Amino acid sequence: MDFPAWHGHIGGMSEGTDNLVPDLLRAVRADVSAIRETLGEHGHRLYRIETGLAGVRREVAGDAEDIAHLGARIDRLREELDQIKRRLDITEA
């Protein structure tokens, strides 16, 4: 069975335990640094996604506006067609 380097030295200081805490702290700092870097990368990616989504929303809003204008134009054309039919006394069968 593998035991930690400090096994058997509890209660007394030895050369192995003198370096254990600093070694563990270095490992923790390295892990925290890697986590910070990853978190920063994710933050940048999230910003790009949010920016892209805002652009998509602007495009959708523009499309909705275009559709509304087309609907109004179709309504006007329908009214004009109805006027023409009335003037020509054309009825649908």
Image (tube, rainbow, N blue to C red):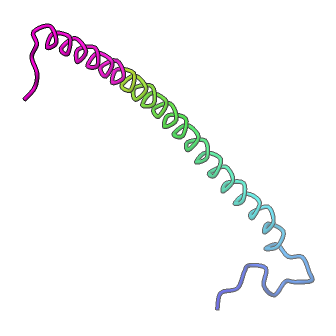
Residue 7 in the image: state x and y as whole percent: 78, 85
Which picture quadrant has residue 16? bottom right
Which picture quadrant has residue 90? top left
* Main SS, magenta residues: helix
Q: Is residue 69 magenta?
A: yes
Which picture quadrant has residue 9? bottom right
Asked whether 64 or 14 is in front, the reply is 64
Asked whether 18 or 74 is in front, the reply is 74
Which residue lies at the image location 26% right of the left edge and 19% below the top edge?
74
**Relative side of 72 to 35, left or right:** left
Asked whether 83 or 2 is in front, the reply is 83
Q: Is residue 86 magenta?
A: yes
Residue 60 in the image: state x and y as whole percent: 40, 29
88 vs 53: above or below: above
Which residue lies at the image location 45% right of the left edge and 27% below the top edge?
55
**Relative side of 26 to 64, left or right:** right
Asked whether 93 or 50 is in front, the reply is 93
Q: Which residues are magenta?
A: 66-93
The N terminus lies in quadrant: bottom right
Instruction: List the single residue furthest toward the front.
Output: 89
**Relative side of 67 to 54, left or right:** left
Which residue lies at the image location 67% right of the left edge and 49% below the top edge?
33
